[in-house]
Image (spheres, helix red, strand yellow):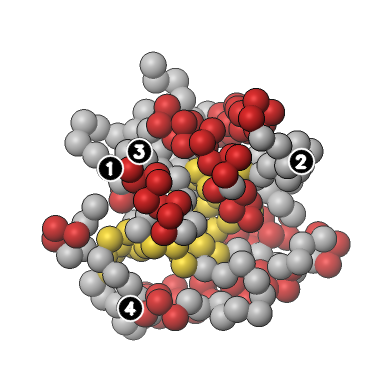
Amino acid sequence: MDGANNTRRLIITADDYGYWPSYNEGILAAVEAGAVDSVSVMVEGTHCDPKPLLESGVEVGLHIDFEGRWGARSGAPARTSLRVQLDRFVDLFHRWPSYLDGHKHCHARPELATPVLQLAEQIKIPVRSVSRDHRQWLQERGVDTPDLLLGRMRSNEPAEPAELRDLPVGVTEWMTHPGYPDAESGSEYDLARREDLDELLRARVRERFDTPIWGEDVLRTTHREAFAHEGGPLRDATSS
């Protein structure tokens, strides 16, 4: 979307809010430091407390989880579970999510991608694209999505993506999983969450006092800002 004026934009997103209390604490530490621009929320869990996020004013999106109590589904059950999670999000945050993505990229599975796309079309919000083909599929159908996704899915990958230091023109999303480890969480990514948090905080200190890792000409932004269109802001949950 920014190719005409060579603008480079970066959205730093913290995933998995609501997964586990100590992970929430790490995410909130990153929010307080100004190290992330948006937070992706898992609304199905018992640890999803909206109050700190609402008080912070950080941008919030729906982190869809089709592996929780719903299990792996397709067709009508998938649409139902998505609607339940959307309704739960609205109950908690009193508005539509600013964007959609999925736990372990479940939202991009072939059997789940279409309901997610249709929801994004309905409430006019972006969707995280996880591959070139997924990105093209969304864009061809008029759904906004970042031009590049960075971030690791496994703890043996570097906490800082190499591409972060040479971002392309357009909108890049850096997907992170900050948190404080807790072996009782059951997450395979447990220890790596502290690495992600430390990396984010280091990057924030450098951004404040030196040249940012991603360069001085890159604009930090939110999904809402990056994909604003003529005609006004996105609708809230009470709009018709």
Q: Are marks 4 and 3 in contact (CB under 8 Å)?
A: no
Q: Is residue 80 visible?
A: no
Q: Is residue 71 left or right of residue 125?
A: right
Residue 14 x/y as whole percent: 54, 58
Identity of the amino acid at label 2? Gly
Q: Secondary structure at mark 2?
A: loop
Q: Which mark is residue 141?
A: 3
Label 3 to label 2: alpha-carbon separation: 28 Å
Q: For label 4, count other residues whose C-alpha is less than 10 Å away and answer few (under 14), some (14-19) or many (20+).
A: few
Q: Circle 2 is placed at which residue position?
A: 71
Q: Earlier in the sequence, mark 4 or mark 1?
A: 4
Nearer the viewer's eye, disc 2 or disc 4? 2
The foreground one among 33 and 131 is 131
Q: Circle 4 is placed at which residue position?
A: 166
Q: Circle 1 is placed at which residue position?
A: 228
Residue 26 x/y as whole percent: 64, 63
Q: Is residue 127 left or right of residue 18?
A: left
Identity of the amino acid at label 4? Asp
Nearer the viewer's eye, disc 3 or disc 2? 3
Identity of the amino acid at label 3? Arg
The residue positioned 39% from the left and 16% from the top of the image is 240
The residue positioned 19% from the left and 59% from the top of the image is 3
Q: Earlier in the sequence, mark 2 or mark 4?
A: 2
Q: Secondary structure at mark 3?
A: loop
